[in-house]
Each structure stands twice: as structure tokens, then as C-alpha cells.
Amino acid sequence: MRNLTHIATGPTIVARAPCRVDLAGGTLDLWPLYLFHPGAVTLNLAVNIMTTCQITPLKGNTIYSRSLDTKREERFQSFEEVRQRKRFRLPITGRLLQFFAPREGALIETDSESPAGAGISGSSALMIATTAALGRFTGRNLTLEQMRVIAQNVEAQIIQVPTGCQDYYPALYGGVSAIRLDADGIHRQVVPIIPEEIESRFVLGYTGVPRRSGINNWEVFKAHIDGNQRVIRNFARIAEVARLMHQALLAEDWTEVARLLREEWKMRRTNAPGITTPLIDRLIAVAGKHGGLAAKVCGAGGGGCVIFLVERGASSRVASAIVDVGGRVLPLQVARDGLRLPPVTI
């Protein structure tokens, strides 16, 4: 796709949103599972692994879509072609274009620092960045919660299974969050931990193998809805573990956080054996020999990333051990801010 900036008709819009690491209570954020477990909460933290959507208005009606990280491109003669399309090479941009229905041409460029299928919600973060950018491009004055609803619903259209709500909050707000899932709605509560404390105690490993979150979550979701008592009991305990971990994080009781993280991982393996792989098991085992206290996969598992809670001062040893047995280490820095949508620039 050629350089199109010479036919730009206005300032470029740039939106950026961070990815996340989930600590406890995941999958319960799928409606209506949390309604069956009153007091459900999910805990996560935003990480400075960023996604970006940049929109440049263009003369005419042609819409160009380009993914810088996957090197995929699409071109539409007008929005009418977008509206009629059933499938897209770039589904996030395509489906959100169908929702926002722009009236003018544009170059839409997306990028993600997250490895493919890492389980750190790169797709959801990119949904937020693209929703924010297209909202501004089409003149919509969206609240953060409206962005969350649009992104979550359109992502469900893309993956064709229910989507949880937790992944969008780190992208919107940054920091460490407790997402309370109540009958009257979803409520985000800040967990006031100094970011450097998190950064010194956690290591983020990547298996190099993409996970299949929609499949894993859907299988467990169906089992719960179908009344599988083992799965229901496990989720009841997962909900309790998340509540206890919330309190432990507030108290900065890292011994208790480690114990609960180990229990969370045990319960998830019971729910869905496919959540782990031989490499994940190997990474967790070797980390434990070099100062790792607890670990769990990020997202629905089956590949992707693993988050390790380590002894103070053990981060480098654990990181080296992970690399030695075939894993990668991703930078873990807490994203202090969420969605960034600065004033338009000329």
C-alpha cells in the first residue's frame, strides 16, 4: 500500500491502549456466570505493552486498512463495500468500521506490541484503541464505559462466542484493578499498590505458542451453564480465591497472594486440563527452583503467557531460567495510564 499522507484532509488521530495480565477471577467476567456467584471479582493489571490505532482522513471515499504488526492490508472503495462485507482480513478494523459507518475516506493503521495469542488481551486492547479512534473520527462523544460496551460486543461478533468484560478495563484505565461483577452492573475499583512493587515481584513469560481463549472459555462456560456441578464448585472457589486475593493485595501480603495464585492455577487446571501444556509446566517448575513462588497462565491458557510471582530479588534468576528452557520474557512494567487519545495534531 503506497504512502497516502499527501492526500490527507485533516489531522491524524492516534489512540493507544495497554494490554493486561489477569491475576484471579477470570472467566467469571462472562455474563451471566458472575450472577451465579454473588460478590464475584476479577483482578488484573495493565502492562506497558501497547496497542495503537492511527487514523488519517483522506480525500474521497476509499478506506485503507493496514496492520503494521501482522503486515496485512485491505482496501475498500467506499463504506458501502465495508457494510456489505461478511469477512475481513483485519476483523477488528472491519467490524468496527461497520459499526461506526464513516462518511469519508481514511487510512486506518493499527499496531500491537503483544505477540500473537499471548493471552494478555492484545485484541481487546486494540479493540479499545480502535473504538476510541473511530469514535473521534466519526464525531462521537463516547464515555469510557460506552467504549467498553461497543468493544466487548463487537469482539463477540468477531470470535462468535461470549466475551468477558475484564480485559477492557486495564486498556481504559491502566493500573491495578479489581473489577466487581454485581447484579447492578460492573464496577472498577483501583488497587492502590505502588507500581514498582508489582514490577519487582512479577515476571512475565511467553511460551511462543498462541492460546485459543475463545475455545477454552466457551467449553468451560457451556459446562457451567449445563449444570456441571464440579465446574460450578470450582468456580465458586475461584470466586472466593479472587475475593481473598483482593484483600491480600490491599494488605500487600505477598505470602498470601502467592498461596492464592497457586490455588487459582490448581482450580483452573481442574476446570480445563487443556489450559496447560508441557512447556508451561516446565516453565513453572524451573521458575520454582530459582525463586518463583507461584504462577498461572494469562487468559484462557493452552499457550500464550505465564505470570510468575517471585521472591524479592529473584526476578533476574527466574527470567534466565525461563529462557534456558525455551521460553521468552516480556517486559513487565505497570501501565500507569490507560487509553491515551491526545488532542489531534496537525
Image (spheres, rainbow, N blue to C red):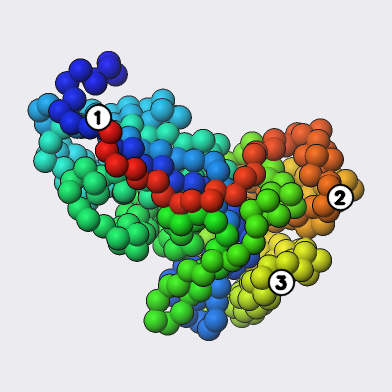
Q: How many marks?
A: 3
Q: Amino acid at mark 3?
A: Ala
Among numbered discs 2 and 3, the one appearing first in the sequence = 3
**Quarter occupied by residue 162:** bottom left
User: Percent position (x, y) of residue 62?
Assistant: 15, 29
Q: Amino acid at mark 1?
A: Ile
Image quadrant holding the N terminus, namely: top left
In the structure shown, which secondary structural element does the residue marked by tag 2 occupy? Answer: loop
> Looking at this rendering, what residue extends furthest in the right direction?
289
Q: Is residue 300 something that shows in the picture? A: no
- In the visual, does 42 lie left or right of 105? right
Q: Which residue is mark 2?
A: 291
Q: Which residue is mark 3?
A: 251
In the structure shown, which secondary structural element does the residue marked by tag 1 occupy? Answer: loop
Among numbered discs 1 and 2, the one appearing first in the sequence = 2
Q: What residue is shown at x 24% (from left), y 29% (from top)?
A: 346
Where is 241 relative to 144, above or below? below
User: Percent position (x, y) of residue 201?
Assistant: 75, 52
Compute the Cα span from label 3 to label 1: 47 Å
* Circle 2 crowding by C-alpha within 10 Å: few under 14, some 14–19, many from 20: some
- In the visual, does 13 lie left or right of 277? left
Q: Which residue is mark 1?
A: 346
User: Percent position (x, y) of residue 176?
Assistant: 57, 60
- Front of the two marks 1 and 2: 1
Q: What residue is shown at x 82% (from left), y 57% (from top)?
A: 293
